[in-house]
Image (spheres, helix red, strand yellow):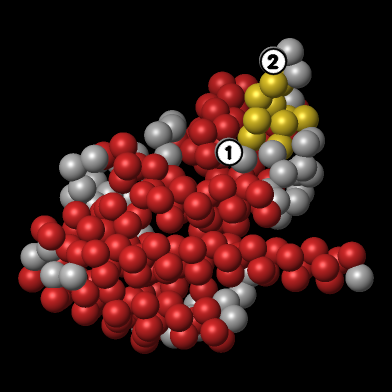
Amino acid sequence: MSETSAFKAEPPEGIDPIGASSEGASLYELIREDIIEGRLAANERLVVTDLARRHGTSTNPVREALQLLRGEGFVTFVANRGARVRPIDQDFVRDIYEIGVLIEPALTRWFVNMATGEDIAELERLQGLIEENNFADIVRHSELDTAFHTVMYQRHYNRHAAELWWKHREVLRAVSRRFSFTLARRAAIMREHRELIAHVKAGNADEAADLISRHVEGSGRHVLEQMRARNAARAG
């Protein structure tokens, strides 16, 4: 497992994963984690000076971090009322994954028509590592799974679409960390990845696009089901 223990997925070439100074990027990670974990409550007002004091920094990196979080949808800005935490609810998750359902088939169709033998070999290598890990380490799985899909989108000519995919995937990755994979979802991921590789090898662009649409929707619905179950348990 040594190959996967240090593995870290990277965004497609030319796409800045954060786009901030090192201090702003660090605060972005900390504040986003506080929002996802509920330490900053839904609709809570985010006061720049308070956050700077809490994290022992100046106000500029805080403003930078809040703008990044605004771009991802974790923070909202209202005129004359400042920044607030956006509720990380089912509507938020639905909106994010539905965008993926719309754009990923187009990215996948292009990839199938352009894929090289090296691309296919890299997909098979990453899928082998995913199966070797077999969900034993969820963070490791997330990194490998992201790298698998990045192979397909990293050279797409439409950099705006590739960047939108990356940013939305990072949002879903952050949210989904709170939940476990069901056995059914684990089996579906493995099966669909293998089917996708087969379609790429065969040059079946339309079939691969249809499959990736179901794959993305399945991932989104799985997170929604987990959220509903958790909310029901809390209410009960």
Amino acid marked by disc 2: Ala
Q: Image check: 8 left or right of 27?
A: left
Checking the image for residue 79, the label placed there is 2
Residue 24 position within the rendered picture, expressed as x and y whole percent measured from the top left: 51, 33
Checking the image for residue 112, the label placed there is none
Quadrant of image for the C terminus: bottom right
What crowding class fits label 2: few (fewer than 14 Cα within 10 Å), some (14-19), or many (20 or more)?
Answer: few
Quadrant of image for the N terminus: bottom left
Nearer-N-terminus badge (1/2): 1
- Of residue 115 and residue 130, the one placed in the foreground of this image is 115
Q: Residue furthest right?
A: 236
Q: Residue furthest top?
A: 80
- Is residue 104 positioned above or below 164 on the image? below
Amino acid marked by disc 1: Gly
- Of residue 112 and residue 8, the one placed in the foreground of this image is 112
Say which residue appears at 31% left-offset and 45% top-offset: 162
Q: How far is disc 1 from disc 2 in space, using C-alphas?
A: 16 Å
User: At numbered mark 2, what does the secondary structure look like: helix, strand or loop?
Assistant: loop
Checking the image for residue 73, the label placed there is 1
Q: Image check: 198 left or right of 44?
A: left
